[in-house]
Image: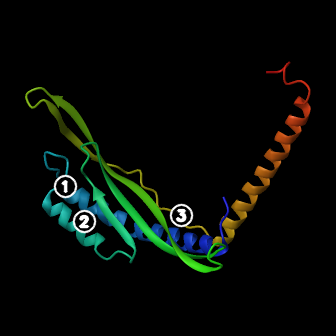
Amino acid sequence: MEYSESKLKSKVNAINKTNNYINKIVPKIKEVLKDDLKLKVNGQLNKKCSDKVDDILKDKPNGMTIYIDDYSMHHGLLKVKYSYEFEYFSSYEKEYTTNNGYIEEYIYLWSNEREWNESKGDFIIVSTKILDTFKPLKNKSLKSVLSTLNKIKKVDNKIELLNNKKSDIKKGFQQYIK
């Protein structure tokens, strides 16, 4: 995958900014959930808990959309989408132009155990468990990302050379080795 340095730098900064924000708010949200996690019959957070979480999420960075998706009766999911700008040279327009990229991250906060209820003809939530699977997201430097991309490019080149060598060996034997 080819990246201009401007796009890659913008993307790395956006991911690191997103990671920092997530690392800051997830522990706070988990504390609220430990104290007040009570779900409505449809699996959504109750108003008291929802309002406390909304207070935590209100001071988000510009360009970030963040909310808890609790519309599934299976789990509660923190969804984060962050828009960032990058500049690139447009060969069509023959000038530098700006475009947007997006970072998305999903963090599972709780899961629900459900059972079939014959009288309601639907599943009901029988228990809810706060998940302890979140590990703080690590930031990467532009230098380490560039290094990794270079390593991937070298491996891709080796694979291409091996595939070419394999094709050369097969010449004249296609019918025999199908």
Q: Which residue is mark 2?
A: 53
Mark 2–mark 1 distance (CA, rounded to whole Å): 10 Å
Q: Residue at x 28, y 42 (%)?
A: 74
| x then y, percent, for residue 115 | 20, 31
In the picture, residue 112 is in which quadrant?
Answer: top left
The residue lying toward the viewer, choosing from 19 and 63, is 63
Based on the displayed image, in which of its 4 quarters is residue 6 positioned?
bottom right
Q: Which numbered disc flags the more N-terminal residue, 2 or 3?
A: 2
Tell me the amino acid under the disc marked 2.
Answer: Val
Instruction: Name the kind of residue labelled 3 in the image.
Output: Lys
- CB of mark 3 within 8 Å of CB of mark 1? no
Q: What residue is rendered at 40% in x and 56% in y?
A: 106
Query: What residue is disc 3 on?
Result: 138
Secondary element under disc 3, as helix, strand or loop, is loop
Task: Give the residue drawn at x 41%, y 70%.
Answer: 21
Residue at numbered disc 1: 45
Q: Secondary structure at mark 2?
A: helix
Task: Tell me which label, 2 or 1, sits earlier in the chain.
Answer: 1
The alpha-carbon separation of the residues under discs 3 and 1 comes to 29 Å
User: For residue 104, which numbered disc appears in the image?
Assistant: none
Position in image of residue 79 (x %, y %): 36, 59
Whether the residues at callouts 2 and 1 have beta carbons within 8 Å, the answer is yes
**Is residue 153 shown left or right of residue 78?**
right
Q: Quadrant of the C terminus?
A: top right
Is residue 129 positioned above or below 81 on the image?
A: above
Element under disc 1: loop
Residue closest to the far top: 176
Whether residue 132 is situated above or below residue 58 in the rendered picture: above
What whole-number distance in Å separates the C-alpha atoms at marks 2 and 3? 23 Å
Q: Is residue 38 left or right of residue 67?
A: left
Which amino acid does the dot numbered 1 rest on? Leu
Q: Position of residue 44 (x, y in %)?
A: 19, 52
